[in-house]
């Protein structure tokens, strides 16, 4: 099993929300997932990013550069997904 399956629920929610935000940037810019190959990403890696798999800081910085957004813009408001939910 991949390490992403062992993430705490709040981390998994965060990465799913981040993946959705990254997808929205791609769509807003008129790119297909296949277009991301020309920006240095493999198709499979890009699909995993949008699916909410955990990504590292280097990948985050490459995404920011690809879409011309700051680190802060990419993560704005996503911290709410890190809060543990009450049962």
Image (spheres, rainbow, N blue to C red):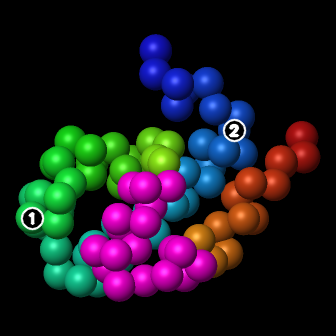
Whether 66 is among the magenta residues is yes
Q: Residue furthest front?
A: 58
Judged from the image, the secondary structure of the residue bearing numbered disc 1 is helix
Relative to residue 33, is residue 49 drawn left or right?
right
Label 2: which residue? 9
Q: Residue at x 43, y 55 (%)?
A: 58
Magenta span: 57-74
Question: Measured along the vertical axis of the image, is residue 35 above or below residue 27?
Answer: above
Asked which quadrant contains residue 31, the reply is: bottom left
Q: Secondary structure at mark 2?
A: helix
Residue 2: percent from left, percent from top:
46, 22
Q: Real-space Cα distance between discs 1 and 2? A: 33 Å
Q: Earlier in the sequence, mark 1 or mark 2?
A: 2
45 in the magenta segment: no
Q: Is residue 20 left or right of residue 27?
A: right
Q: Name the chief secondary structure element in magenta.
A: helix
Percent x, y for residue 39?
17, 66
**Residue matched to label 1:** 38
Residue at 27% over, 51% down: 46
Callout 2: few (<14), some (14-19), or many (20+) C-alpha neighbours within 10 Å?
Answer: some
């Amino acid at each position: 099993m991949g390490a992403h399956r062992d993430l705490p629920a709040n981390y998994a929610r965060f990465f799913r929300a981040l993946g959705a935000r990254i997808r929205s940037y791609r769509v807003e810019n008129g790119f297909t997932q296949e277009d991301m190959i020309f920006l240095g990403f493999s198709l499979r890696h890009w699909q995993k990013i949008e699916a909410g798999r955990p990504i590292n800081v280097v990948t985050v910085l490459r995404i920011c550069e690809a879409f011309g957004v700051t680190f802060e813009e990419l993560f704005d408001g996503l911290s709410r997904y890190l809060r543990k939910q009450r049962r």
